[in-house]
Image: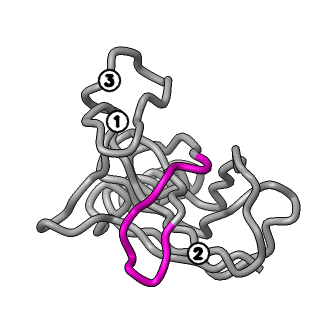
C-alpha cells in the first residue's frame, strides 16, 4: 500500500510538472558569456512548440541580424541549451537568442531559416519575439 501511495505521488508530481511546462509563458533566459569554446548557451527556454534556438547577430538597434548558430528545442521547458556557433564571434559582440518554429519548412528536424524567410521562422507571442540578448565575453 505504501508503494502504491508513493507511485501515485510521483505520478502526480510528474503530471503537474508536465502541465506547468506546457503552460508556462514562452521565454529565453541567458546571461553574458564567453564564446571562446564556439558555443553560446541559454540557461532555460520555454518553447510553445518544437522548434529551434536561433542565434542572431544584433547591435544597439536590437534588430535580428544574420544567423550564427542554432540548436533544436522541444515544446515546453528546455534547460542548458547549447548552440554551436557557425561563424566567428568576438568578445563584445551582441547575440540575440531567439525561439523559432519548426513550421513552414519542407523537412522536419532540419533548420531551414534564412534571414527574412518564413521556413522555421521566429515565434511571436502577443506580437513580440521570444528572445533575449547577450554579449559575448
Q: Quadrant of the C terminus?
A: bottom right
The residue beneath circle 2 is 94
The percent coordinates of residue 43 (x first, y second) are 61, 69
Q: Quadrant of residue 22?
A: bottom left
Front residue of 103/46: it is 103
State the residue in front, 101 or 61: 61
| Crowdedness near tag 3: few (<14), some (14–19) or many (≥20) residues, C-alpha within 10 Å | some
Query: Nearer the observer, disc 1 or disc 2?
Result: 2
Front-lying residue, 73 or 19: 73
Residue 7 left/right relative to 81: left
Q: Earlier in the sequence, mark 1 or mark 2?
A: 2
Q: Which residues are magenta?
A: 58-69
Between the C-alphas of marks 1 and 2, the distance is 22 Å
| Residue occupied by mark 3 | 105
Q: Give the residue displayed 71% in from the left and 75% down from the top.
A: 136
- Residue named by callout 1: 120
Whole-percent x and y of residue 66?
49, 52
Amino acid at each position: 500500500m505504501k508503494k502504491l501511495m508513493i507511485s501515485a505521488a510521483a505520478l502526480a508530481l510528474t503530471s503537474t510538472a508536465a502541465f506547468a511546462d506546457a503552460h508556462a509563458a514562452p521565454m529565453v533566459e541567458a546571461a553574458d558569456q564567453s564564446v571562446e569554446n564556439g558555443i553560446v548557451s541559454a540557461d532555460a527556454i520555454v518553447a510553445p512548440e518544437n522548434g529551434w534556438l536561433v542565434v542572431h547577430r544584433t547591435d544597439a538597434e536590437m534588430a535580428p541580424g544574420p544567423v550564427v548558430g542554432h540548436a533544436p528545442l522541444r515544446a515546453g521547458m528546455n534547460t542548458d541549451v547549447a548552440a554551436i556557433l557557425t561563424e566567428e564571434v568576438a568578445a563584445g559582440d551582441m547575440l540575440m537568442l531567439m525561439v523559432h518554429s519548426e513550421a513552414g519548412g519542407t523537412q522536419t528536424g532540419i533548420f531551414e531559416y534564412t534571414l527574412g524567410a518564413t521556413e522555421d521562422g521566429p515565434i511571436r507571442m502577443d506580437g513580440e519575439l521570444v528572445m533575449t540578448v547577450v554579449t559575448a565575453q
